[in-house]
Amino acid sequence: MEEKTPHKRRVRYSGTHPKRFHEKYKELNPEKYADDVAHVISRGATPAGMHISIMVQEILDFLQIRPGMNGADATLGYGGHTRAMLEKLEGRGHLTAFDVDPIESAKTKERLAAAGYGEEILTVRLQNFAEIDRAVAESGKKFDFILADLGVSSMQIDNPERGFSYKVEGPLDLRLNPLAGIPASERLKEMNREEIEGMLIENADEPYADRIAATMMQWRRKRRPLETTTALRECITEALSFLPKNEQKEAIKKSCQRTAQAIRIDVNSEFEVLDAFLSKLPDVLAPGGRVAVLTFHSGEDRMVKKYFKAQLREGLYSEIADEPIRPTAEECVRNSRAKSTKMRWAVRSEY
């Protein structure tokens, strides 16, 4: 007698305000539950499994996209910026999008294809944007416009399995491509105290870098591995226990954010990738081509500012942003993750 496969019920909300990522089945299916998702967004929150694109209008205003142009989105992510730029092409021209995350890029490609943006107008490359010159070499066409949103997508932050958030239990991973390289937990085992302290200072300007690094080494000697996001939070809490009680909560929160950022940058070689990308930009932009870069922390912003200024002096750019453009106060209310964003831009010289 043939055995029947037992029916597996879908995970549902627990109560009215679910906290677990996988219980939020409505937010994870925005096409089907559009009203529920809109309600979450109206409260200034980002639905689970989604990413709300930042400064879309400011980007479009600067890039001045016209039908027939050839452009690039250096970081595909959830595809919000990509779709806005594709709409400006009006079915003529082409957009190449880069992403190293095989999980999210496949979902986004499928979503955009369902919206009518197939391979005739959109090419998705599972590739680091530091290799943007390869796309130009293969097509023989330079880009009229480029957008690089350097932030981590909300889908990655919110999914506990990716290990990007210290707020929920998950493996201490932090890889943008979970199929390549080593997770953060393994990377930390390779580093000594001086290297960890230097990483925290260089990548996140962490004021308590020395104490956090020292505590991490103490945990290692006691055979308490930092293998989960909550273990990292506990380690930082212990490191900052010397602070006055009334200061600890906020200090621990900020140090957790900075430490996770610093480790993520190291694990994904983000500064090296950005350095390669910025150095190649003038060569992949067509004469008069425009590039906009969204940064989310001081290290990124300093690097973009430095490159743009140097390349302006060399005559590679005809104009750059004197000051970064910031999101409006209204946008920051709607999307709290926009608060730290800065947009810098440059225009390629005509020769």
Image (tube, rainbow, N blue to C red):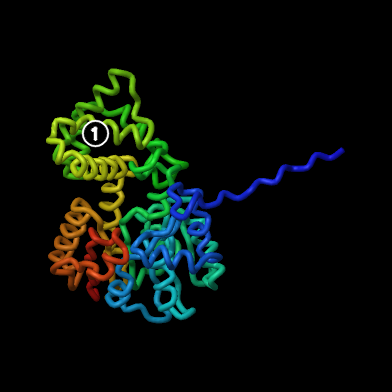
Q: Position of residue 43 (x, y in %)?
A: 36, 64
Q: Residues within 10 Å of mark 1 (few under 14, many from 20)?
A: many
Position of 269 relative to 234 (above/below): below
- Please, what is the three-letter code of the amino acid marked with disc 1? Thr
SS class, disc 1: helix
Q: Which residue is mark 1?
A: 237
Q: Residue at x 36, y 56 (%)?
A: 129
- Residue located at (41% from left, 38% from top): 170
Q: Residue at x 53, y 65 (%)?
A: 33
Left or right of 14, for residue 202: left
**Quadrant of image for the C terminus:** bottom left
The structure residue drawn at horizontal position 43% and vertical position 64%, both measured from the top left corner, is 79
Q: In the rendered image, which quarter contains the N terminus?
A: top right
Q: Quadrant of residue 113?
A: bottom right
- Residue 104 x, y percent position in the rendering: 47, 54
Query: Which is nearer the eye, 98 or 220?
Result: 220
Front in this rendered view, residue 10 or 30? 10
* Residue 6 at x, y percent in the picture: 72, 42
Task: Tell which residue pokes out farthest to the front in this image.
Answer: 15
- Whether residue 140 is visible: no
Left or right placement of residue 349 versus residue 165 in this view = left
Is 159 above or below relative to 88? above
Is 308 on the left-hand or right-hand side of 25? left
Residue 199 drawn above or below residue 279: above
Can the viewer see residue 232?
yes
Q: Is residue 313 above or below residue 252?
A: below
